[in-house]
Structures are given as C-alpha cells and as structure tokens.
Amino acid sequence: MQDDPIPSVRFPNGIDVPALGQGTWAMGEDAGDARAEIDSLRAGIDLGMTLIDTAEMYGDGGAEEIVGQAITGRRDEVFIVSKVYPWNASLKGTIEACEHSLERLGTDRIDLYLLHWRGNYPLAETIAGFEMLKASGKISAWGVSNFDTDDMQELLAVPDGANVAANQVLYNLSRRGIEYDLLPWCQSRGIPVMAYSPIEQGHILHNAELIRIAKAYQATPAQLALAFLLKRDGVIVIPKTSNAERVRENRDCVSLDVTDEDWQSLDAAFPPPAKKKPLEML
C-alpha cells in the first residue's frame, strides 16, 4: 500500500509539502529512547513523510536535537517546522530563539517557523522578527499555532501579517470544533491547517464505531482516524511515534478508500460542531 502517493498541501509561497508528516512531541526527553526516535523519523523520511514538526519546547530542545540527528546527510529531503515560545517572541528574542533552534537542528534554515501560542508580546513585534529571519534566509516561511478565528483576523490586520503560511491547531475526530469556522476560514484564504494530536494521544482508539469501521477495511483505528483528517482540504497531519513499524502503519492510511456511508457513521459517532466552540489546546 505504500506505493500510493501521499497527498500534498501547498503553502502560500508555492511550496508543496506532504499532507502526512511526523510529530516529535515528547521526543528527546530520555537518552535511552534516542535511537528508536531517530530510527522512526528516518523510516518516515524513507516513506515520504518528509515534513517533521518540532519545537524548542519539546524536551527543552531535546526533540530538535533528535531531529538534527535524524536528518544528518538528508537535510534537502525534509521540510522542518519548529516553534518559538511566546515568552521568547519579542523581536530580539524571536531571532535568538531561532538561532538556538538552528544550532540544535544542525542546519542553516528552518522551513516553517511558528509562534507556539499567543503571549504578551504584540503580534507586530513577533512578525517583525519573523520577517527579519526570512530576509536573512534563516527561515523560509512563518506561521502560528493555537490561533482561533479572531486571532487570525487580528493577525491579518498587522503589517506583514498576511504572510502567515500556516496555523497549527489541535484537531482530531474528538476535537472537531475548528470545522465550524476556523477551518473554512483558513481554507478560503489558502492558509494550511496543521493538525496536532491527530489521534488524541491514543484516547479515541477504543471507540467501538471507529474500531468497527476500521476492521471493515482491514485497517487500524489510528489509520482510519488519520484518513479522516487527510480528507480535509489544506490539512497537514503530524502523528508522532517512536516506533518505526507504527510509522509504516501511519503511512498506509493514505490507501484507505472509505465509503460515504462509513464516513457518515463516523460522523454519528464523532459529531461535527453545531455551533462555535472556543479553540481547544493541549
């Protein structure tokens, strides 16, 4: 099944990236896990899951070091996403945080650099830092994370705010609130949405209806949950695992051809929002 191509999503700057990437939350926290974490990321790269998402927050920089080791000799094959803490997101702090991330990643550029969530620094100041990093070639594009619709509207009103390349938010079958307004708002403007925690850290995988439908396709519940997200236009899914075999399972989700009837059954088990909900975060 891994012969089926991974669908792609186009960023506003014209760069196409795989819609199925790899997350690294909680990597780099235990030296004893490093080899498995590196191997799993490399397995994903081999399978075309070349977008890797990380952050200075994860493992206090340890995850970025794991990514750096995983991409050694393969930098040009991958699309690296990292994030700046909100309390580092002053103009000077954004630039310094990026430079520290570059050192840990062992690279001269980050492909997409995100503000991890809103903090006390004005958006205009953070964006000015992003734009300086872009002008110097240290990042190729910038975006945000955990921004709701009103945050995005405010962002676009800030000088250079329209240069935002993505919004990374919590999105999975049990957290569908963004489908009411944020997702269509981003889709209508060509701003990709990155879905983090796409299987709710495993909590949704015991749902009886999810299990029933997955079995009908000889798939795992996780594969079906990922396939659900990949059906959405402009959505990039970043599951995290330190198990190379699980990486291969994740990759196979692109081959699922689910009937409309079964998607409707899944909607009944995990209803879409009927009204606006505050943006959820983990």
Image (cartoon, helix red, strand yellow):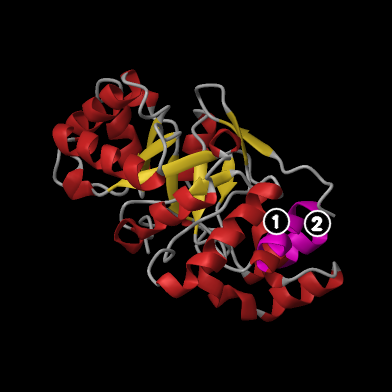
Q: Where is residue 158 in the image (x, y as percent from the top left)?
A: 25, 25
Q: Is the magenta stretch mostly helix, strand or loop?
A: helix
Q: Is residue 69 left or right of residue 94?
A: right
Q: Circle 2: is it few (<14), some (14-19), or many (20+) Cα within 10 Å?
A: some
**Nearer to me, 61 or 191:** 61
Q: Position of residue 183 (x, y in %)?
A: 50, 43
Decide: is 34 above or below 97.
below
Q: Does the magenta stretch include residue 264?
A: yes
Cα separation, mark 1 vs mark 2, equals 7 Å
Residue 88, by quadrant, is top left
Amino acid at circle 1? Ala
Residue 267, by quadrant, is bottom right
Q: Is residue 119 visible?
A: no
Q: Name the residue under label 2.
A: 256
Q: In this view, does 241 lie to the left or right of 154?
A: right
**Nearer to me, 78 or 152:** 78
Residue furthest to the front in view is 73
Q: Quadrant of the N terminus?
A: bottom right
Decide: is 166 above or below 217.
above
Decide: is 40 above or below 137.
below
SS for tag 2?
Answer: loop
Residue found at x 37% / y 64%: 282
Q: Give the range drawn in magenta.
A: 246-265
Contact, CB < 8 Å: mark 1 with mark 2?
yes
Decide: is 215 above or below 22.
below
Residue found at x 73% / y 77%: 211
Residue found at x 53% / y 66%: 35
Q: Where is residue 188 in the image (x, y as percent from the top left)?
A: 53, 30
Amino acid at circle 2? Leu
Q: Name the residue under label 1.
A: 227
